[in-house]
Image: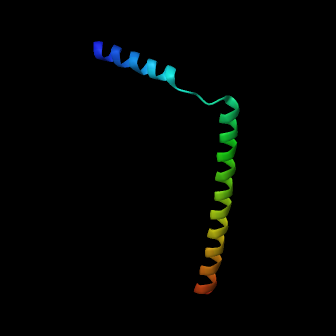
Amino acid sequence: MNKVKSFLKEVYGELKKVTWLTRKDVVRSTISVGVVVMLVSIYIALVDLGLTELMKYILGGR
């Protein structure tokens, strides 16, 4: 039990040293990630659609 208390005290001490991002930075990063995810999703959907149409053409319109 003593080791657990010591570990938790060390963790708390290390967390006090951490430099946390500001709320503005977190919001900006979250929006950036959302935009990139949407763009990649659209790209993948378009490639999938194109390859599907290509396979339909090659296989005779099935």
In the depicted view, which residue is nearer to us: 4 or 46?
Answer: 4
In the depicted view, which residue is nearer to us: 57 or 7?
Answer: 7
Q: Decide: is 56 above or below 33.
A: below
The residue under the point 52% across, 26% down is 18
Residue 40 lies in what quarter of the image? Answer: bottom right
In the depicted view, which residue is nearer to us: 38 or 24?
Answer: 24
Q: Decide: is 62 above or below 27.
A: below
**Could you tell me which quadrant the N terminus lies in?**
top left
Colour scheme in the image? Answer: rainbow
Q: Decide: is 3 above or below 38.
A: above
The residue under the point 70% across, 43% down is 31
Residue 45 lies in what quarter of the image? Answer: bottom right
12 left or right of 45?
Answer: left
| Residue 53: x %, y % from top left | 65, 77
| Residue 23: x %, y % from top left | 68, 29
The residue under the point 66% across, 52% down is 36
Please indicate, yes or no, whether residue 50 appears anywhere in the rendered image: yes
| Residue 15: x %, y % from top left | 48, 22
Number of disc labels? 0
**Could you tell me which quadrant the C terminus lies in?**
bottom right
Please indicate, yes or no, whether residue 62 appears anywhere in the rendered image: no
15 left or right of 3?
Answer: right
The residue under the point 56% across, 27% down is 19
